[in-house]
Image (cartoon, rainbow, N blue to C red):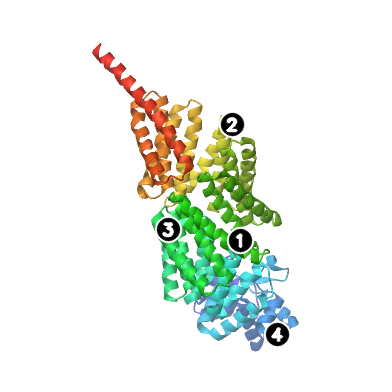
Amino acid sequence: MLRTEPVCSHNFLVRRSDMDITEQLRVLQAAQGDPARLTLATVDLAFPTLADNERADLKTALQAAAIPHWCDAGILAALLEISPESAAAQLTRLRKLTVIEPFPARGDDAVNVHEASRLALRCWLAAERLESFRTWSQRVANYFAKDPSPAGRIEWIYHRLCCAPDEAADELERLEREWTGSARPEDRYALAVALRELLAGNLLRDRAGVWASLCIAWNRVARGEAAQLGDDAIDILNRAIATDDLRAQADAHCLIGDVAGAQGRLPEAYEAFGRSLTISQQLAVQEPHNTSWQRELAVVHSRVADVLQKRGQLVEAQAAFEQSLALSQRLVDQDPSSVVWQRDLATTYSRLGNVLQMLGKSSEAWEAFEQDLAMTRSLAERDPNNSVWRRDLFVSLIRLGAMLQTERRFNEAYQAFQESLSIGLDLTGRDPSNLGWQRDLAVGHNRLGSVLEAQRELGEAEASFEASLTISRWLADQDPNNASWQQDLAVALRRLGRVVQAQGRLVEAQAAFGESLTITRRLAEQDASNAGWQRDLAMACWWVASVHTKSGHPELALPLYEEAARIFADLVERFPDFAAWHGERDAVQVELEQCRIANQTSAGQASVVREE
């Protein structure tokens, strides 16, 4: 990224010139402290003996060079519509200014105006010389329109937004949809940085501002920051409504749903996704041949299915995922070369497989997981440096490994989890600030620990669970409003407690289980409709009860066993399709009866002692 340097008068006195100090101070005072005028004054300071018309031309060149993020002779020639030779001569003079620095990332002859000075000039031009600002922006947009690289695409849309904001809003929307699932995270982040710059300079309004804000928000969601976007998401929706942009409204509702989901507010998430779905269906009917809207419809069906799954409505979730799958498959059939549509199809197979597994439909789940893994591995191998596709492969391996572990194929599950953990370590090594990837890494450690525990490798399992707990606790501290991360922390504590209990360390186990129960109870009370959280509460009660039993305190265990049994009984009655919960209900009931007997025996023995 470019360096930011404050525009202060002393910055302009660092190079010697033929101008004496009195004249230098007069030039700086004439600028009256205005950052843009101070930047232009560097021409007078550096070239005091140059003819007035030549200095004026050089100031014009400096203004033009401030339009793009970087400049070389070719870009300057396009901006000023002069010959490459004249542009090279002007660039040679510009290099002598204190506000110009080399920019080797874009070539040996590339330079850039220091960021603070560049932004000051751009804002001044937009306010005082709008026609020149838009003309130069259009010229540089035309120049970069021929550059297909990510950096070229970012520079192109950046300048299109400045010269033709309403048309560019549609172009930005298309670019965002094109890059979702195909662009590397670092390129999407660079686009978000460029858009933030325009918004901070108050250069984008109306639809252009809405779509710039949406792109920035989606980039943050991809980085695991959805729970932090509450006010931003509402503001974007209000602005989308004000501009009467239905496409932006559908996106904004979807964003609100993601925020609510991350914060654990499932009813609000479901409502928001429902509104997005209604608009998307309306648009898809209006333009049945618009593949972009068919894709968005598939995406929203998948979002709705996610909420239904969390609420325990597995049959309804399966139906919604299958609608998404059918739409995605149709798009891939139309254009098998589209990596975005291939990725959508693979992701939907993965999510559908997860629901099918919960429903106990093993053969169908296997088929879905195998389809997903084949496609995600193919994409990851096509571009090993694409972090999005690498992360998709991570998720595919995690879900496949969980299925293998359920079927007690521990060696194969271990291999899948080891490969996924390797990917997680690689991704977090590339960008430690990506909170979503940090969360993935915690999941990877957790899954590996679970298969090691199943193989009775308790020491190694404990190490994996400790690694998961460290990351989960750090994430939960980063954003206490992120309910998903709070849940992750509770699960990590429970699994660590389980493995230390198996090693006879009951005090440590009780501490871990107790903290897990506190977190889980708080989440379950926050939203009774979240079936997963209710199940987690039952599990937490169960494990605390078990450690009380092993510690010889059945009287403390009994109320917790009874609570767990009540929750499981309620879940099985409300969600009979959840195959695994039937087994858990029955197992808790067995331990509850044993605890009652132990408690009665203990009470009888205590009575005998009192009588004696």
**Quadrant for the N terminus in the image:** bottom right
> Quadrant of residue 48 in the image?
bottom right
Q: Earlier in the sequence, mark 1 or mark 2?
A: 1
Q: Residue at x 43, y 28 (%)?
A: 507
Residue at the image position 47 percent from the left and 33 percent from the top:
497
Residue 201 seen: no
Q: Residue at x 53, y 60 (%)?
A: 323
* Earlier sequence position, callout 4 versus callout 2: 4
- Density class for disc 2 (Cα within 10 Å; few <14, some 14-19, many ≥20) is some
Amino acid type, callout 3: Ala
Which label was assigned to residue 329? 1
What residue does disc 2 label? 455
Give the crowd class for mark 1: few <14, some 14-19, many >=20 residues within 10 Å. many
Secondary structure state at the residue bearing disc 2: loop
Q: Vertically, is 424 above or below 602?
A: below
Q: Residue at x 37, y 28 (%)?
A: 593
Asked if residue 388 is positioned above or below residue 423 in the image, the reply reads: below
Camera-nearest label, 1 or 3 = 1
Dots 2, 3 in contact, CB < 8 A: no
Q: Residues within 10 Å of mark 3 (few under 14, many from 20)?
A: many
Determine which residue is flagged by label 3: 269
Question: Residue 151 in the image: x percent, y percent?
Answer: 65, 68
Circles 4, 2 touching at the beta carbon (< 8 Å):
no
Q: Which mark is residue 82?
A: 4
